[in-house]
Image (cartoon, rainbow, N blue to C red):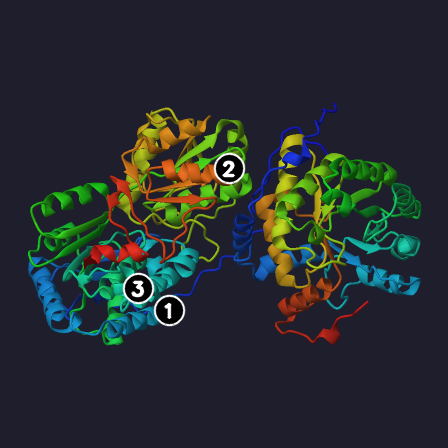
Amino acid sequence: MKSIISIPDFSKSPAIDQVGVEERVARFTTRSIKKASKVQGLKMALNMIDLTTLEGKDTEGKVKQMCYKAVHLHDALPDLPSVAAVCVYPTMVRTAKQALQNSGVKVASVSTAFPSGQSTRKVKLLDTTFAVENGADEIDMVISRGEFLKGNYNFIFDEIAAIKEACGAARLKVIFETGELSTLDNVRRASDIAMYAGADFIKTSTGKISPAATMPVSLVMLEAIRDYYYKTGIMVGMKPAGGISTAKLALHYLVMVKETLGNGWLSNHWFRFGASSLVNDILMQLAKEATGVYQGAEYFSKD
Amino acid sequence: MRKKKQSLDFTSKWGYEPAPENSDHIQLKKKYELFIDGKFVKPTKGKYFDTINPATEQKLAEIAEADESDVNKAVKAARNSYENVWSKMPAAERGKYIFRIARMIQERAREFAVIETLDGGKPIRESRDIDIPLAANYFFYYAGWADKLAYAFPNRNPKPLGVAGQIIPWNFPLLMAAWKIAPALATGNTVILKPAETTSLTALKLAEIIADSGLPPGVVNIITGGGKTGAAIVNHKDINKIAFTGSTDVGKLIQHSLANTNKKLTLELGGKAANIIFDDAPLDQAVEGIVNGIFFNQGHVCCAGSRLFIQENVANIVIQKLKDRMETLIVGDPMDKNTDIGAINSKQQLETIQKYISIGKKEGADFYQSSCALPKKGYFCKPTLFLNTSQSHRIVQEEIFGPVLTIQTFRTVEEVIEKANNIPYGLSAGVWTDKGSRIFNMTSKLRAGVVWANTYNKFDPTSPFGGYKESGFGREGGLHGLQPYLSL
């Protein structure tokens, strides 16, 4: 039985108080995670990472190397999970798919004229279809921030809905580039639009703009996900991306997810980190927990 | 993915490890004496009472009980140092001593935080991040005023009153001592301070700091004991000023006994604050404000936001969010850094809270508590809501002083102002709305000494604090806080 979801007026998304958000975030960072819960949390975080390379200079060779790393994070340590996915440009999807084969690691592709999104709907749809046809399991699209800031919310809604349709079975992550939206009110509004338009994940940033993911921005998005879930019964995933490079910060994010959305979201089906340098910092912490000493950066592979 | 019934799972699939603060560095004496005339002296009658850790019910130390003759000694010392030393000292020199006390509190902040938590039951997170730093800040702030009183009150001739008797409560032991002592010293008065019976330790530690600081003997005297000791201070003939923070009942007794005397009086008494949520408020942040308003310090806060008013059209949403948030609150060992809500201060207070909870149930209000587990030993109370209450409920009218929130809905601005003011108290209030003009309208109509807008329970030395109606009179903090200690 399908229930009918009525579309709200996005100009009336709930108000956000930045001071209050920052105070709440500060509380997450004072939760003490150590010993067994630290190891458990770090492994969970590793398993939530979208290992990413999004550069003009990417080649098949580079992508293959990264895919190997995605499955073999640090073979010296037993019982390590793989990352959740690799995230590449559409032209690299086929290579990544072949490299990962049946490893269980998903292939995510950015699309829709990433990172600026400055192109026509037609080109964006072609971009998406190309990635899906090459085997992408997940699509990371960007919204047209210019149109959003003009107040053209229907344009954004339609854009997301159209890309969602082009995704077929692939799961759609919608990137807001929160560093360009400037206010938390806008972040909340973009979250509402994306979820009602069919996003499977909402994602903070491309990683190309500073600031990228921050905890206050992510908290606002998690709260939007919670409100949407209570309204519709539909779970939406969350992906902060860019700027999360330390194990400690990753744990703070997990605390935030746990205390905002609960255990239901503590898996890579519903929560991801878009990051690349985070992996080695987590590995370093795990090696320290296992051996009692920190090891130098060169003991961990850089792919 | 669709589910039939939406609910979030906050059980501990991935939990936090216990992270207890170390108390090995704390040195507590077996017995604490009275601090009179710069020295620790035994009480005349040699009587002592126990102070216990409310989280473990274990005895921490014995505290001297001062009787009338001890109070006499303290007043004599205070009078002597006022006449011969303190009132003659250049104001800038007075300021230096206060600065020194502030710095010494900062230096020993960790020790103070741990003792505050052991003795009072409040979570270490609060004593470490709020109580102790704020106490130091009050000393810093008033130290600055010491030599600038003429600028604080231009064209007047500010003069100290003499000897001040100060009686403080158990909910913020060191912070309340700072609120009282700092302005009294800055204005040139000498002090007899009595901490609350259940929480004397940090005040006595402060006495150690004061002794180490070289403050002239007798300027600050700290004597311990219960209600009788307090009464002896209040009724002493050679005291010029009484400052009391505590219950409204005791406040009334004090005011009664001071009638027909020349003593000046300030009272900071109970409260039953309205925390008002409008439908346009940032609701998720408002929920934080509700939690911070009523569960901060286990609700042992005179300005706690204990009456919640939610605009009816968002009531269900706010209550859902509040219940979810309550599931993430950790109640337990106050020494654990992860603990959000610690121990109730005393057995007696726990019984009061439980009495009100059973009254609320009998009155037919909808009772709700979070599902957290409580430690087996010690005095603890789950965070509690009473939904569907009205102004006529006793639990809405009377101060509970615990983690118990009553919730009412309202429809219009006029209605909520009327209900918020419909109480004998008037200490504080909170307003949550995205509309600036509405905030100003509300703050001018709410009969409360402090009104917070889109936040709650925020304290700062520069900001005056105090009540209307049965919440007392006189202001503490800020420039206003100097006035009760001066003749102008």
Q: Nearer the viewer, mark 2 or mark 3?
A: 3
**Residue B249 quadrant:** top left
Dot 2: chain letter: B
What residue sits right under mark 3 in the picture?
A: B142
Secondary structure beneath dot 2 equals: helix
| B281 relative to A1 in the view: left or right | left
Secondary structure beneath dot 1 equals: helix
In primary-sequence order, the first of circles 1 and 2 is 1
Q: Are marks 1 and 2 on the same chain?
A: yes
- Image quadrant containing the C terminus of chain B: bottom left
Q: What is the x, y in percent for residue B365?
A: 39, 26
What residue sits right under mark 2 in the picture?
A: B323
| B37 relative to A176 in the view: left or right | left
In primary-sequence order, the first of circles 2 and 3 is 3
In the foreground, A220 or A147 = A147
Graded by Cα atoms within 10 Å as few (under 14), some (14 to 19) or many (20 or more), the crowding at tag 3 reads many
| A227 relative to B159 in the view: left or right | right
For the point 73% across and 53% down, the residue is: A205
For the point 70% across and 51% down, the residue is: A178
In the foreground, B179 or A101 = B179
The amino acid pointed to by label 2 is Lys
Residue B335 visible to the viewer: no
- Image quadrant containing the N terminus of chain B: top right
Q: What is the x, y in percent for residue B169?
A: 26, 51
Secondary structure beneath dot 3 equals: helix
Dot 1: chain letter: B
For the point 43% across and 62% down, the residue is: B21
The amino acid pointed to by label 1 is Gln
Q: What is the x, y in percent for residue B50?
A: 22, 57
